[in-house]
Image (spheres, rainbow, N blue to C red):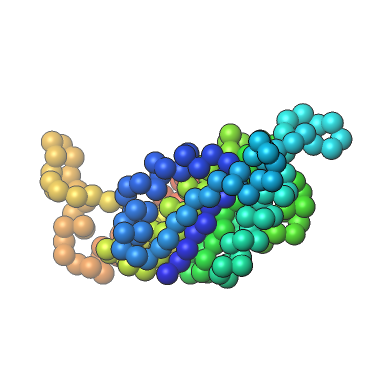
Amino acid sequence: MTRIDILTVVPRLLDGPFADSIVQRGVDKGHVEIHVHNIRDWSTDKHKKVDDVPFGGSAGMVMTIQPIADAIAELKAQRDYAEIIYLTPDGERLSQPLVNQLSIAGNLILLAGHYKGVDQRVRDHFITREISIGDYVLSGGELAAAVLTDAIVRLIPGVIGDEMSALTDSFQDGLLAPPVYTRPAVYGEWEVPEVLRSGDHAKVRAWEEEQALARTQARRPDLLEE
């Protein structure tokens, strides 16, 4: 079973994303464990403070090393972890191949950054991977951790009823997914393409590949360049 431990200073932000849908289904089925930890629980400060002003006089506050280091040390003493991931805007861009890799990696620790980030010594000595969900800045890494967790959990075998569904998503083969249709076949003046109603699976696959390539060329030509 995969276990994901998330370290955060505002754990309540993650109550909603993990309470329903596929992530909760994965937990209920026993395929994944998700544990959200309040970093303040490890703070030795009498006020449970986890941030301080940066050296050098820069603006903002920085997450201190002590509670993060102690939290990671305690978790690692209990089990092995494949990766300790820091969610940060300057990390490597999250992609489907990376998600595929993490979904089979094993236990993970996710550190949600906050304020102006974390003491660089945390990144230098504890973090094994840094991931960004896009070129923008959020108030904290909690939503990024939720995005990464959702993307990983849905790929764990047994979580989704039809596992082939996940394998035909956009980006799995380097292309965007083709258009999809369902009943009714005719709605007003709009009809489902005839090939999808033909029952000829070879023609359907060829049409889907053609549409996926055309959509990728029109919307994300950078994927073809890569």
Among the 4 quarters of the image, the one containing residue 45: top right
Q: What residue sits 67% from the left and 49% below the top?
A: 67
Looking at the image, is 48 positioned above or below residue 98? above
Horizontally, is 29 left or right of 149 in the view? left
Q: Quadrant of the N terminus?
A: bottom left
Residue 54 coordinates in the image, percent (x, y): 79, 36
Q: Is residue 34 left or right of residue 112?
A: left
Residue nearer the viewer, 201 or 122 = 122
Could you say where residue 33 lies in the image, as x and y percent from the top left? 42, 61
Q: Is 222 or 165 nearer to us in this picture?
A: 165
Farthest residue to the front: give it.
46
Q: Quadrant of the C terminus?
A: bottom right
Q: Residue at x 13, y 36 (%)?
A: 188
Image quadrant of residue 25? bottom left
Please give the count of numbered marks on the rendered protein.
0
Is 98 above or below relative to 144?
A: below
Q: Is residue 2 left or right of residue 39?
A: left
- Give left or right: position of 7 versus 125: left
Which residue is found at the position 47% from the left and 63% from the top?
3
**Furthest residue to the right?**
56
| Residue 167 in view of the camera | no
Is residue 196 in sight in this rendering? Answer: yes
- Name the foreground residue: 92 vs 130: 130
Question: At which x and y percent is residue 15?
Answer: 42, 42
Say which quarter of the image contains residue 163.
bottom left
Residue at left 19%, top 67%?
A: 200
Can you give x and y, in whole percent of width and height, for residue 4 in the image?
Answer: 49, 59
